Image (tube, helix red, strand yellow):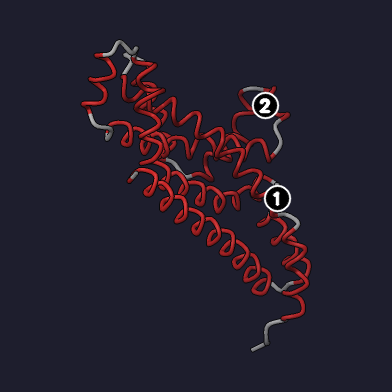
């Protein structure tokens, strides 16, 4: 049994840290787009516009019911066969598209549940004072729903960061892709993957700590 090459592992850390910004950038871009899309989907699931509601349910069912890796392959390898202009899409764009749609489907259900959880008396009071449905959602319902949904949405963001590791299958040299290349060049696979696992772990722990602070602050603000 060979001992771990500690020197190699320590030398690999700064190399892999150079790819963290791309990994976080893809996750942040995907989260921003997914939040907007999820909010729209959730609102539609609450107001239930005929025909559109069925289309939204189909969208959510598909992206919740199929593996993310399959969806990424569909965007990067499959769709360009049907629409030639999509051949210009690079791996980063395809990964962001896939992550956005995949997580928007999950986040929409969480936001919808948070919206429905708002006290119905507040809905009725808003309508009684003459607010339109759009005003009621924007001023009364969504701000309260965001407080309830926030912890769950942070969990999805953490999952999204981990899911960016699949982008290497599209040829993207992000954190996981860089690790694959380094491991293939050195043949020190165990050491390489231990290092990247620890980096992901630290990122997740930092975000989890931030999530706990956010929950605590929101609970204090709500208590007032």
| Residue located 69% across and 22% down the image | 85
| 166 relative position to 16: left or right | left
| Residue located 72% across and 51% down the image | 173
User: Where residue 155 appears, x then y in whole percent?
Assistant: 45, 50
- The secondary element bearing badge 2 is classed as helix
Q: Are marks 1 and 2 in contact (CB under 8 Å)?
A: no
- Is 84 rendered above or below residue 205? above
Q: Compare residues 30 and 70 and report the one nearer the observer.
A: 30
Q: Compare residues 123 and 197 and report the one nearer the observer.
A: 123
Residue lying furthest bottom: 1
Q: Compare residues 81 and 149 and report the one nearer the observer.
A: 149
Q: To which quarter of the image does residue 143 belong?
A: top left
Residue lying furthest front: 224
User: Where residue 26 appears, x then y in whole percent?
Assistant: 64, 43
| Spatial CA span between label 1 and label 2 | 26 Å
| Residue located 36% across and 39% down the image | 110
Tell me the quarter of the image containing the C terminus: top left
Whether residue 61 can be seen here = no
Q: Tell us which disc is closer to us: 1 or 2.
A: 1
User: Where residue 203 appears, x then y in whole percent?
Assistant: 59, 59
| Residue located 44% across and 29% down the image | 39
What label sits on residue 86 in the rendered view?
A: 2
Tell me the quarter of the image containing the N terminus: bottom right
Whether residue 46 can be seen here = yes
- The secondary element bearing badge 1 is classed as helix
Q: Mark 1 points at which residue?
A: 21
């Amino acid at each position: 049994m060979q001992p771990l090459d500690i020197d190699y592992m320590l030398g690999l850390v700064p190399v892999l840290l150079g790819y963290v910004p791309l990994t976080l950038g893809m996750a942040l871009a995907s989260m921003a787009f997914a939040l907007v899309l999820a909010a729209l989907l959730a609102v539609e699931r609450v107001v239930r516009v005929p025909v559109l509601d069925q289309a939204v349910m189909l969208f959510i069912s598909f992206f919740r019911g199929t593996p993310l890796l399959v969806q990424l392959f569909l965007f990067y390898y499959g769709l360009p066969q049907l629409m030639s202009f999509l051949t210009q899409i690079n791996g980063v764009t395809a990964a962001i598209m896939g992550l956005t749609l995949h997580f928007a489907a999950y986040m929409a259900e969480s936001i919808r549940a948070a919206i429905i959880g708002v006290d119905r008396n507040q809905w009725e009071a808003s309508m009684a004072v003459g607010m339109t449905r759009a005003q009621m959602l924007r001023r009364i319902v969504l701000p309260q729903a965001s407080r309830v949904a926030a912890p769950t949405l942070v969990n999805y963001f953490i999952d999204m960061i981990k899911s960016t590791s699949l982008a290497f299958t599209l040829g993207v040299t992000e954190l996981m892709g860089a690790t694959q290349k380094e491991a293939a060049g050195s043949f020190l696979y165990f050491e390489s993957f231990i290092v990247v696992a620890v980096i992901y772990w630290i990122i997740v722990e930092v975000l989890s700590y931030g999530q706990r602070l956010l929950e605590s602050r929101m609970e204090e603000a709500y208590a007032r």
